[in-house]
Image (cartoon, grey):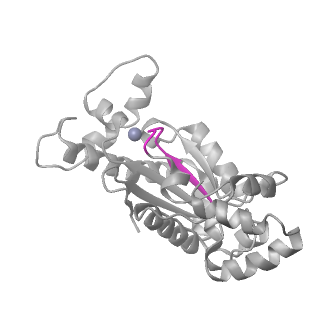
Amino acid sequence: MDTNTHGTHAQCGHLDRRGFLRLSTSVAALGLLGGSLYGSLAYADALTKEQRDKLTPDEILAQMKRGNERFRKGERKPRNYLREQKASAKGQYPAAVVLSCIDSRAPAEVIMDLGIGDIFNCRVAGNIANDDILGSMEFACKLSGAKVALIMGHTACGAIKGAIDNAELGNLTGLLAKIKPAVQATVYSGERTAKNYGFVDAVARKNVEFVMAHIREQSTVLRELESQRAVKIAGAMYNLETAAIDFFA
Ligand SMILES: [Zn+2]
């Protein structure tokens, strides 16, 4: 929590809910209230179905980009996690599903300044897709109404390095095998080793492209939703050094 959050909370602490909503409408007009995906129309603590359904996939991606810009500048929308938790306890209407790596330095909500109830999260080393990940994404989009499926790789990814190095360890071996086609397909003129971060990051990007293609090939549900323009399948790379997310489109 930052000081702004406490400040906002303190101001609202003595108001009843109706009073809070009145206050929040004016606060929202200034773009100060939490609930990152509301944009300038913020007036509640977690996305409602009505709010989510009004957003287009492009608007949701734009909100994610703006959230990352705030993160990079050290800014954050004031938010109250307990209020978000209470507002979302009886139902969730996330706008997107994000498939990203388990890397501790790339938590999607934090680096895109999002809150509770904003996005579904699939996290697996190397942000690969298998049948269970596809099932999770199909649930998120077809049954729960998320409109963006964002595949987000990141720089200096250990899973990508492991695939380049042909690392072998228990069940990790099979996971890394899913990344190896991206290693082979990466066109790169320099040193093709895990020590060369230029190559590692090029493979990570190719891997995101391959995962996007895999989703379109292997998930009839998501492919149809995308062809109906109900869902956008998007790719991105998060840079651990600069904190910037490079959205592919
Ligand atoms: Zn990683």
Above or below 162: residue 216: below
Q: Quadrant of the image for the C terminus? A: bottom left
The residue lying toward the viewer, choosing from 56 and 13, is 13
The residue segment tinted magenta is 95-105
Residue, x 16% and y 39% (percent of image)? 192
Residue 127 in percent (x, y) is at 46, 42
- Please indicate, yes or no, whether residue 98 appears anywhere in the rendered image: yes
- Residue 98 part of the magenta-drawn span: yes
Compared with 219, 63 (above or below) is below
Which of these two is toward me, 173 or 63? 63
Above or below, comparing residue 130 to residue 28 in the picture: above
Q: Residue 200: image x %, image y %?
A: 25, 43
Residue 182 image position (x, y, % from top left): 32, 43
State the count of labels.
0
Q: Quadrant of residue 57?
A: bottom right
What residue lies at 34% left-to-right and 53% top-to-bottom? Answer: 239
Residue 215 spot, x, y in % from top left: 52, 50
Q: Residue at x 52, y 48 (%)?
A: 99
- Residue sticking out furthest to the left: 190
Residue 81 lies within the magenta run: no
